[in-house]
Image (cartoon, helix red, strand yellow):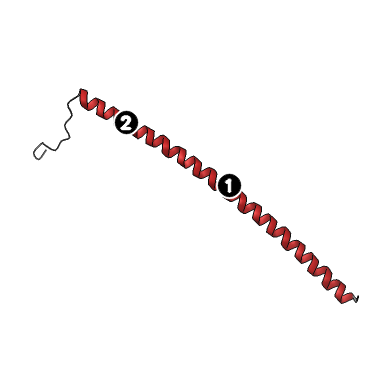
Amino acid sequence: MSRASKLTLAGTTASAIGIVILVHYQQQAEKAAMHAGVLRDMEQQKIKKERQADFEMQRALEEEYRKVQKVHDGKDKGGV
């Protein structure tokens, strides 16, 4: 083989190996980002459930207090 063909073969082989390594690291980075997104979504769902539970508890307390106390919403007052 000539010197030019050996250099061409070495260059293309090195380029191919570099591309494979680059693609591998990109895939790992994408996988990590996707996993982080899943964890973030799970945390948001947990927070949403906690807020919904707090809201339901507040609604139940409000209904209980309305049974015990007389509450006016302020609509039946004239212009005050």
Q: Which residue is drawn at 9% across and 40% down?
A: 79
Compared to 80, does 29 lie above or below?
below
Compared to 70, does 30 lie above or below?
below
Residue marked by disc 1: 35
Residue marked by disc 2: 58
Name the secondary structure under disc 2. helix
Residue 78: percent from the left, percent from the top? 8, 38
Compared to 45, does 21 lie above or below?
below
Query: Taking 71 as reference, is 27 left or right?
Result: right
Q: Residue 62 carries which label?
A: none
Tell me which numbered mark, 2 or 1, is placed earlier along the sequence. Answer: 1
- CB contact under 8 Å: marks 2 and 1: no
Name the secondary structure under disc 1. helix
Q: Could you say which quadrant of the image residue 39 lies in?
A: top right
Q: Residues within 10 Å of mark 2 (few under 14, many from 20)?
A: few
Q: Residue at x 34, y 30 (%)?
A: 57
22 or 67, nearer to the observer: 67
Query: Taking 60 as reference, is 28 left or right?
Result: right
Residue 71: percent from the left, percent from the top? 18, 29
Q: Residue furthest right?
A: 1
Q: Which residue is drawn at 73% across and 58% down?
A: 21
